[in-house]
Image (cartoon, rainbow, N blue to C red):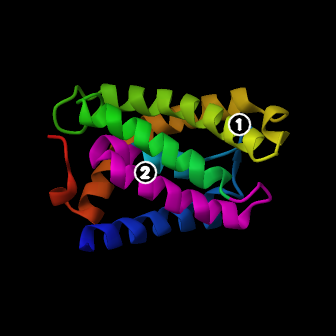
Amino acid sequence: MTGLIRLVLASALMGAVQLSVLSPIRLAHVTIMLMWIWALALGISINRWYATIGGAVVGFMLDAQSSTPLLTFAVTGALVGYICGRLGEEGIGDLDGAAWWSGPIVGSLGIVISVLAAMCVATVFGDGTFWRGNAGASMVVNMLLAALLVRPLGRFARWAIGDDMVVHR
């Protein structure tokens, strides 16, 4: 139970950093989406269920502060966390057994899934503006950042939540 509480607190911290620090910053006219990278990092470093919950928590925080339909980012974060968690449980990109370069590759490819999932989820919820935006630029910028940040965020996740919650080793 304490692991779940620590997960919610760490995810709330990531949501706060996303909203207060990163959301106003634009890199090539693109918002840096730490929330997606956090869900990816949880997936490859902890397990799929914690990644699903953490992605949903940080996504819900972003949903509450944005003009998108409610639950767009929460559902996207949960989907991305679950998918990346499945990869991590298979040993693809995990912090312990995989090659050092596989985590950044999984993180970068996870961003492609994140952007496409956000576009599809938003469309299901009635928001077609994601299709008119700069999805390609969003993918490229966030892929580069995911490649750099997924492993350090994974290490932070293990420190914040605890190594005893790790399913795959």
Q: Is residue 127 above or below residue 110?
A: below
**Image mark for residue 13:** none
**Marks 2/1: CA–CA distance:** 18 Å
Q: Is residue 157 above or below residue 92?
A: below
Q: Which residue is mark 1?
A: 119
Q: In the figure, is residue 83 to the left or right of 128? A: left
Q: Work out which quarter of the rendered image holds the C terminus and state it.
A: top left
Magenta: main secondary structure: helix
Instruction: Look at label 1 and name its amino acid.
Output: Met
Q: Residue at x 35, y 55 (%)?
A: 50
**Do tag 2 and tag 1 residues touch (Cβ < 8 Å)?**
no
Q: Position of residue 23 (x, y in %)?
A: 68, 57
Residue for badge 2: 52
Does dot 2 land on a helix, a strand or a loop? helix
Q: Position of residue 94 (x, y in %)?
A: 26, 36
Give me the residue at 65% from left, 40% from top. Answer: 118
Magenta-tinted stretch: 41-70
Q: Residue 139 in magenta?
A: no
> Toward the viewer: 18 or 161?
161
